[in-house]
Image (cartoon, helix red, strand yellow):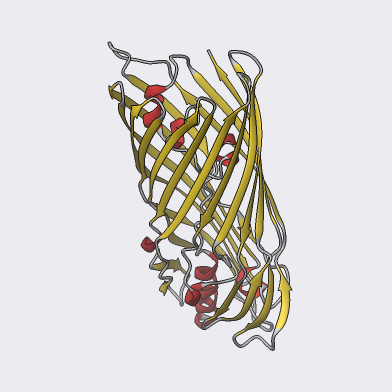
């Protein structure tokens, strides 16, 4: 029985490996492929660059967004150690709807130097399922849901300099399901959740009307997911539940951004983003099984690496009511070959996007954006996998409504 449970723990650590960070969290960010920091100018600045709240018009700003995400099936051609000859397999496609909301207050303070913001979104998550064996032995389902509530405050130091800070309240929920190898007396099934806290900082400097620079930092949040594992212990025990816990990093992120007005109606922005995935050097899992097994503590090397993303966005105002946006980005994977698994067969990606925003009147605007994330094919040879992952891609569609009063 103890050997069986240790096998389950190994499967669980494989499945609970991924942060599934989602950088695009608003209409403008989707339209600009995430190149939306230095020039953040609507209510979603409360999330992307709260220091910019100091430079916004004195109105109260609200934005509501809805995002549809479609993950195309991933193809695999190769073999799994100890699970038969080379073969082909395909993951299930995934579809998600994610709501987002943002608010920026009117100026406060004696000199109107203070603004308060609030954002509610889902900065990480999604799911990966492999419905057929032998891949389902390792990743029948991995689902991670993350919701963040982020109140922020900005302070206008001078006419061209502002700073901001905020608190990150992060709720996470994880679901793991695996099939054990044929002949084993049960499956692995674990679910848990947690509330955790972090912080974020921002600085904006606009020495000229046509040029600005911004720095932002979002701290690491360790998602301390606690829950229960259901397992079939076989006769005479049957289905049992054991409390378990696992800690997953929502990694720290640093961005440097600069934007420039090429003309009165054309703005270009460049963003360099560093995600500190090296915090995910190992995954520790603890399960308190009933006697005679007792507590099982296991740690498994992940050795993820810090990753870089380079983003370029273009905003073109066609007239006083309509603007077009387009973006291009190159995103590096943090996952080294030795720890690539079926829960996240990640690879470097090229991202393209386009969107528009239309001002209905002085108070209300509407918009839509589309983003396509194209993953490179990746050939992997490690202790578990010898094969190639291909055709991995994601489609994001975002619609939004902005209102100021």
Who is closer to the viewer here, 95 or 363? 363
Along the viewing direction, whichever of 313 and 71 lies nearer the viewer: 313
Residue at 44% x, 45% y is 271
What residue appears at the point 51 percent right and 61 percent down from the top-left corner?
18
> Is 93 rendered above or below residue 187?
above
Q: Quadrant of residue 214?
A: top left
Residue 48 appears anywhere in the view: yes
The residue drawn where x is 35% and y is 27% is: 208
Q: Residue 240 appears in which quarter of the rendering?
A: bottom right
Measuring from the top left, give residue 335's x and y in whole percent: 48, 67
Identify the residue at the far front of this view.
263
From the top left corner, tell me how far across and down residue 225 is, in percent: 46, 55
Nearer the observer, 19 or 380: 380
Q: Position of residue 76 (x, y in %)?
A: 68, 74
Relative to 31, residue 306 above or below = below
Examine the rendering and report whether any part of residue 20 can be seen. no
Q: Quadrant of the N terminus?
A: bottom right
Tell me: residue 141, above or below residue 326: below
Apparent side of residue 197 relative to residue 265 in the rendered image (left or right): left
Residue 126, percent from left and from top = 60, 53
Across the whole image, how many numbered discs are drawn on residues? Answer: 0
Q: Is residue 366 above or below residue 254?
A: above
In front: 100, or 359? 359
């Amino acid at each position: 029985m103890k050997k069986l449970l240790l096998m389950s723990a190994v499967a669980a650590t494989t499945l609970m490996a991924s942060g599934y960070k989602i950088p695009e969290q608003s209409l403008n960010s989707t339209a600009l492929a995430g190149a939306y920091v230095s020039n953040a100018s609507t209510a979603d600045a409360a999330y992307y660059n709260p220091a910019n709240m100091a430079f916004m018009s004195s109105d109260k700003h609200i934005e509501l967004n809805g995002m549809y995400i479609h993950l195309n099936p991933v193809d695999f051609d190769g073999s799994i150690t100890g699970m038969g000859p080379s073969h082909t397999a395909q993951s299930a496609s995934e579809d998600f709807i994610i709501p987002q909301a943002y608010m920026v207050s009117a100026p406060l303070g004696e000199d109107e130097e203070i603004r308060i913001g609030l954002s509610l979104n889902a900065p990480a998550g999604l799911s990966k399922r492999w419905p057929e064996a032998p891949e389902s032995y390792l990743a029948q389902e991995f689902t991670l849901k993350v919701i963040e509530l982020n109140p922020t405050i900005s302070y206008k130091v001078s006419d061209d300099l502002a700073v901001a800070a905020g608190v990150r309240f992060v709720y996470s929920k994880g679901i793991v399901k695996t099939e054990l190898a044929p002949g084993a007396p049960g499956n692995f099934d674990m679910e848990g959740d947690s509330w955790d806290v972090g912080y974020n900082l921002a600085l904006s400097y606009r020495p000229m009307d046509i040029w600005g620079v911004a720095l932002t930092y979002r701290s690491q949040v360790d998602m301390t997911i606690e829950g229960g594992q259901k397992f079939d212990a076989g006769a005479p025990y049957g289905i049992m539940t054991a409390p378990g816990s696992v800690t997953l990093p929502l990694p720290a992120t640093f961005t440097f951004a600069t934007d420039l007005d090429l003309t009165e109606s054309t703005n270009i922005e460049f963003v360099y983003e560093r995600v500190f995935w090296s915090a995910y050097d190992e995954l520790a899992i603890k399960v308190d099984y009933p006697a005679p097994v007792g507590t099982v503590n296991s740690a498994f090397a992940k050795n993820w690496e810090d990753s870089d993303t380079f983003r370029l966005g273009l905003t073109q105002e066609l007239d006083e009511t309509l603007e077009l946006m387009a973006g291009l980005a190159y995103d590096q994977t943090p996952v080294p070959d030795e720890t690539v698994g079926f829960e996240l067969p990640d690879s470097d990606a090229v991202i393209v996007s386009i969107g528009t925003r239309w001002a209905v009147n002085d108070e209300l605007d509407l918009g839509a954006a589309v983003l396509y994330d194209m993953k490179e094919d990746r050939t992997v040879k490690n202790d578990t996998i010898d094969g190639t992952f291909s055709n991995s891609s994601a489609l994001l569609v975002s619609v939004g409504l902005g209102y100021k009063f």
